[in-house]
Amino acid sequence: MAEEVKSPAPPPPPEGEKKPAAEERAAPTSAAPAKPAAPAKPVGPVPVPWTSPLVEKYRSQYGSGLDAQTYLGQNYLTVDRSLIPDILRLLRDEEQFDYCVDITAVHYPKREKQFDVLWILYSFPRNERVRVKTQIADGASLRSSVSIWPTANWLEREVYDMFGIQFDGHPDLKRILLPDGWKGHPLRKDYGILQQDKEWVQINLGIESGQ
Amino acid sequence: MSARANDSTKDVSSLSNLDLETPEKTYLDSNELIINMGPQHPATHGVLRVILKLDGEKVLGTECVIGYLHRGVEKIAENRTYTMFNPYVDRMDYVAAVSNGLGYCEAVEKLMNVEAPARAKYIRVILTELNRIASHQLWLGTHALDIGAMTPLFYTFRDREEILKIFEKYCGARLTTHAFRIGGCQYETYAGFEKDVKNVLTFFAPKIDEYEALLTTNRIWLERTKNVGVISGADCVALGVTGPVLRASGVQWDLRKAQPYAAYSEFDFEIPIGTNGDTYDRYLVRMAEMRQSLRIIEQAVNGIPEGPIMGKVPKVIKPPVGEIYHSIEAPKGELGYFIVSDGSTQPYRLRVRPPSFVNLQALDIMVRGLLVADVVAVIGTLDIVLGEVDR
């Protein structure tokens, strides 16, 4: 799939380049045990640095607060939380990333900054995608991007609903898929799938289990 | 019909800020009315609840209440292996299950750095495009029924059967097909598959003309759809609206062309677009898309290569540590999967980017200033499936 491979040549992965997020994963990082003749290589491809005029420009502007990598031909920027509304606005205004495809989060309970929050962006003029990623601690909040892309409204509500991440400046931050009285945020890793039986199903539906 | 004139005060940033507390000044100075449409309402195509704020018949604002069909698909994914999760994706957009499966399988394949063989890709394209036609037919039948035209529903359900029969013969299921596997297809085509598909091609072209004869120049249909639910291309982009709704607003963008997947780069087809972005244009765009799908199927079925249908994937699916976003052009718009692998047999995180969910957000801006009856038309024209909105 010829996606957004612009400048980098992905195949030769420099050894030792590791995605920072991967190190703290709950499961062992040594991917799969050596399997005979399996096409899924035990180590697999690794992210390589992504260099492009876009990255150079923002790196000179923001310095170490920004890191750019490519994995399997897909580019992503890892940025410091403090840059978050600004860099998104710049990407839309200056780099034509006019379509916010998705906003989502990933929970790593063992990490100090527990959440990765991601913006998947697409540019119609450039036909190119980029992911912007930031790490935040539990209880910390992010600035809302509803003023940049109105579509962020429901997407941020869903992230709040599922992960409990607050977005400051959101016009109406409340649960979207779950009922208002729901306890907890289900897509956190510490939310067991049987928890809802005790806290919702038994109380509200009067049955033993929803499983 | 003068109430149809679009409010120039529309503002995309004011979405879901429906203020139910403070009354607005209304015509005749009476208080505005707040009513619930749904969740048990036949025209909401499932369990969608729309809170309408009305001045008489005129809609001042709406708020969608969703989640009645929430099953926690993303949480389920974290507790299933990649293979076990495959059938679950069919239950999201259950009228286009094949598309869901295609997106999921391709995303996992990409994450594993494997590719399906050419024959499997062709089978995938044929089934996915058949499913697109089936999905559009279901949309047409129910949308027309909502607006008051009853006959198209019978026509489309009658003809959709021919497609479902092919699915049934191919994999045993009609709706939640689970047609594809990670790495290719599970089943080789049955004897007579190509003949059946070619029959559908000759059978369908005149049927689409038949639907058009019922509606395209029908006076009532024109009155109910022209200039109803207008949305501009710029607003679509700002709201992340994709699929036929975006294209009817004049943006010529289709992932099958923009970032081709499966075997789409090998086929010749066009992206139909509209100009006004109203309900009528969306109708025309979907009708044209069905014809384009027939074109793609014809090329695919005539050029289907021989060879294996399953790529070299291990029995136990264990993608290396990493993450991937892959999206396809589902009948409703951009359907994306974002998968984070920690190197185990289960996804560490699986996010579905559902087109219906994002498109539904545009309902508010599309219906402001219209009449209550038009809300029904606009919900129909957005072509949402609540299984996918709520997941």
Image: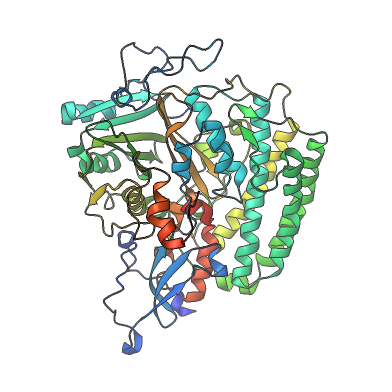
Residue at the (83%, 36%) spot, across then down: B192
Quarter of the image for residue B139 reads: bottom right
Residue B163 vertical position relative to residue B264 in the rendered view, above or below: below
Horizontally, residue A154 falls left or right of residue B42, namely: left
Quarter of the image for residue A174 reads: bottom left
Q: Is residue B20 visible?
A: yes
Protein image colouring: rainbow
Q: How many numbered discs, if any? A: 0
Q: Position of residue B328 (x, y in %)?
A: 52, 39
Between residues B268 and B36, which one lies in front from this camera angle?
B36
Horizontally, residue B201 falls left or right of residue B106, namely: right
Q: Position of residue B129 (x, y in %)?
A: 65, 43
Residue A85 vertical position relative to residue B319 in the rendered view, above or below: below
Q: Is residue A1 visible?
A: no
Q: Position of residue A16 (x, y in %)?
A: 31, 12
Residue at the (50%, 27%) spot, across then down: B110
Q: Residue furthest front?
A: A208
Between residues B63 and B263, which one lies in front from this camera angle?
B63
Q: Position of residue B234 (x, y in %)?
A: 39, 53
Residue at the (48%, 52%) spot, across then down: A209
Residue at the (55%, 10%) spot, across then down: A36
Between residues A187 and A17, which one lies in front from this camera angle?
A187
